Image (spheres, grey):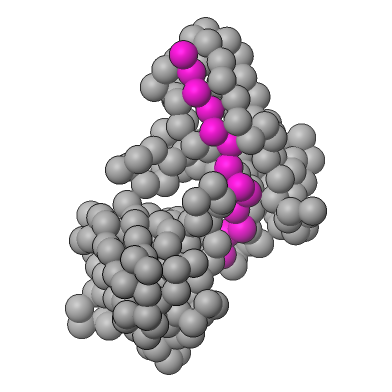
Amino acid sequence: AQSVTQPDIHITVSEGASLELRCNYSYGATPYLFWYVQSPGQGLQLLLKYFSGDTLVQGIKGFEAEFKRSQSSFNLRKPSVHWSDAAEYFCAVGVNAGNNRKLIWGLGTSLAVNP
Amino acid sequence: DADVTQTPRNRITKTGKRIMLECSQTKGHDRMYWYRQDPGLGLRLIYYSFDVKDINKGEISDGYSVSRQAQAKFSLSLESAIPNQTALYFCATSFSGANVLTFGAGSRLTVL
């Protein structure tokens, strides 16, 4: 079955520390991969995406993610976290569904940042 | 102005009432979606529309209906609201084939 797993429900890091949020998927082919961020009281915003090509992708706000086919993973990283990065982070996978693609969402990782 | 506007942003209603959540967009996207977000359950797709004449059920459409009044407008209705429909509802849009969603700010619905 197609699925997306974000193993960490909640993560707390100190401001300035590095961050890695994990995302694993189950799908028989190479999917489209996305990370979205939801700040408190707001809608989701695209951080970055992978469709093909270079497996290390750069996004907004200093985030990057690496697609590792052998591990079925697409982990999100940031070298130095800012207090404004506190938010909910969602990984999503686009899989083939007939003539279209459908998105399968992870349940999210809540990030808290200590001053 | 926001690219995707949802109204109302907050609504409290009673069981059995009819509720409509509205979504309008200025992105010029052809595809529109309604999602529901519940704590611990992530995002679940209610309905989606690829154009004005194409409306499709998502994974949790029971108890909901939609109307695509124009390319830029997509409304979600709860004909007879029940408490377990208390949730945060998101409208999203995309350009066909792009798979990248633009979300509204959300409509928080509480059914008492």
Count of numbered badges drawn on the protein: 0
Q: Position of residue B70 (x, y in %)?
A: 79, 40
Q: Residue at x 70, y 50 (%)?
A: B4
Q: Residue at x 73, y 55 (%)?
A: B3
Q: Residue at x 56, y 51 (%)?
A: A42
Viewer-closest of A106 and A111: A111
Viewer-closest of B10 and A80: A80
In the image, which residues are magenta? B100-112
Q: Position of residue B83 (x, y in %)?
A: 42, 17
User: Which residue of the protein is positioned furthest toward the front in this rendering?
Assistant: A115
Q: Is residue B108 visible?
A: yes
Q: Residue at x 53, y 66 (%)?
A: A46
Left/right of residue A89 with respect to residue B77 in the rendered view: left
Q: Is residue A23 magenta?
A: no
User: Which residue of the protein is positioned furthest toward the top in this rendering?
Assistant: B16
Q: Is residue B52 visible?
A: no
Note whether A87 is above or below A81 in the view shown.
above
Q: Is residue B101 magenta?
A: yes
Note whether A82 is above or below B82 in the view shown.
below
Left/right of residue A10 with respect to residue A35 in the rendered view: left
Left/right of residue A111 with respect to residue B32 in the rendered view: left
Q: Quadrant of residue B22?
A: top right
Q: Position of residue B93 (x, y in %)?
A: 63, 53
Q: Position of residue B25 (x, y in %)?
A: 74, 49
Q: Quadrant of residue A110?
A: bottom left
User: Which residue of the protein is positioned furthest toward the bottom in this rendering?
Assistant: A54
